[in-house]
Image (cartoon, rainbow, N blue to C red):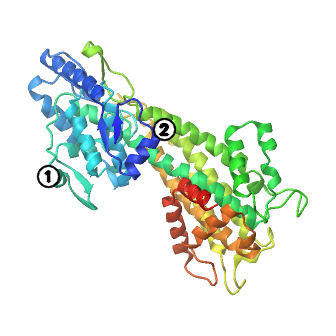
Amino acid sequence: MITLTGDDLTLKQVKEVLFLKKKVTASAKSLQAVQKSREAVEKIVSESRVVYGITTGFGKFSDVLIDRTHVQDLQLNLIRSHACGVGEPFPEVVAKAMVLLRANALLKGYSGIRPMIIEKLLAFVNADIIPVVPQQGSLGASGDLAPLSHLALVLIGEGEVFYKGKRMDSLTALQQEGILPVVLDAKEGLALINGTQAMTAMGVVGYLEAEELAFESELIASMTMEALNGIIDAFAEEVQVARGYKQQIETAARIRHYLQDSLLTTQQGELRVQDAYSLRCIPQVHGATWQALDYVKEKLEIEMNAATDNPLIFNDGEIVISGGNFHGQPIALAMDFMKIAVSELANISERRIERLVNPQLNNLPPFLSPQPGLQSGAMIMQYVAAALVSENKTLAHPASIDSIPSSANQEDHVSMGTIASRHAYQIIENVRRVLAIELICAMQAVEFRGIEKMASLTKAFYEKGREQVSSIKADRVFSKDIERAAQWLKTLDFHQFMKDHLKKA
């Protein structure tokens, strides 16, 4: 059980909730702070004070006062009118993360929401009642209004959910779990939707997959090093230390470890003096990606524990401030950075693929074909990798530099952070397929070099890979191989693989 406080949720804990089905609960202390904040809202309503979003309309309607008898209607109308997202739904794991992160943010006690609303959200997480949330429609400032409105619909028994493998009306799922829908009261609708949880949830899931992929890319690159008789000298510790980047040093150290007992790597001058950059510069390029991922991780963990709605309530309601914490610029920039950084893993991988299949750059059979000429082998796999990295160049265009005014120019600068996070995820999926192609080609190439000469760790990885994709003995529909390898990389627990190898060793 993971106890949420609103202040110290980590990516590791989110991963456990999303992928290991750990249950969550709210800390009693945090719920007390939530209750105090709620009492402040009720006092504001009873005194008919003019406070944005509590006794006024929203956005450009912030100057329209709402009679206290219409407080509940105001919140209901807000959720229904703002639930206008379009397109395919977010992956279920992302939508579940949204619910988790929204509950955690509300537990900070600045939002004026009733504790029972948070408890309902956590019940959704624990019962795997996952809102159907369309991906498109958020500008990433004033929060993720459209996506989070679809999340809020579930609380009131409207909208749709994914539940027990089916898509259904939310009320049906709530009834099956014995959860009653709620009637939203003052401030609650606004508190639920005025946040950055759609872009952050998408970013969190993207980051978790990108982190695994970055580790996998190093092991795949190590196998390519063996397939091309790469020069190990370039990975020497003193070379990395001379530059000073921690992530570069760590990348080189991991690859030295992976290849420590290989009989396929070479020394300077043994076959050639130096390798092409796609081999020699793995620590520098992959290490720079790790630098960016470290930055992204830091920003995500701050945002996961941030109060991002408006207005915020302080000092037991004595101070209510309309601010801009809903603006997604910090996450928008982080997502754009992640897009570029992860794209580079595919860019350099595609160049290694070319070296694996091009007979002018190696002494392997052309395109790794079992019968060059009669059979094309891996020829078109390189085309696919080239197409994917080119597509990534378009997706990596920064979303955060765009802004379109909204709400009659009241909201005149927006982050487009949700677009950035969605494109980042598309890039990650493309990169995984490129790495799957490199893996397939590297496995084929090491067979020509001699599997018995491989390092013990890369050989273990090769054997696992061969369980997914068989050796190329004749041309076949390689699309299926690529997708199977990519899916394996997505589901592989890299650290568990390493632990299992250590046990066997």
Q: Secondary structure at mark 1?
A: helix
Question: Marks 2 and 1, Cα distance to the nearest angstrom?
Answer: 38 Å
| Coordinates of residue 352 in the picture (x, y in percent) | 71, 61
Most distant residue in the left direction: 69
Residue type at mark 2 is Ala
Q: Secondary structure at mark 2?
A: helix
Asked whether residue 493 is in view, the answer is: yes
Give me the residue at 62% from left, 56% from top: 217
**Residue to which mark 1 is pinned:** 175
Q: Please tell me whether residue 250 is drawn above or below residue 491 in the rendered image.
A: above
Residue type at mark 1 is Gln
Q: Which mark is residue 337?
A: none
Asked whether residue 390 is in view, the answer is: no
Most distant residue in the top direction: 318
Q: Please tell me whether residue 232 is drawn above or below residue 293 in the rendered image.
A: below
**Residue to which mark 2 is pinned:** 332
Q: Please tell me whether residue 110 is drawn above or below residue 465 in the rendered image.
A: above
Give me the residue at 14% from left, 52% from top: 175
| Coordinates of residue 11 in the picture (x, y in percent) | 46, 41
Q: Quadrant of the N terminus?
A: top left
Q: Quadrant of the C terminus?
A: bottom right
- Label 2 environment density (alpha carbons within 10 Å; few <14, some 14–19, many ≥20): many
| Circle nearer the viewer, 2 or 1 | 1
| Coordinates of residue 471 in the picture (x, y in percent) | 62, 78
Q: Earlier in the sequence, mark 2 or mark 1?
A: 1
Residue 134 shown left or right of residue 463 in the figure: left
In the image, 293 versus 450, the foreground residue is 450
| Coordinates of residue 174 in the picture (x, y in percent) | 17, 50
Give me the residue at 40% from left, 38% from top: 140
In the image, 502 versus 254, the foreground residue is 502
Q: Please tell me whether residue 369 is drawn above or below residue 324 in the rendered image.
A: below
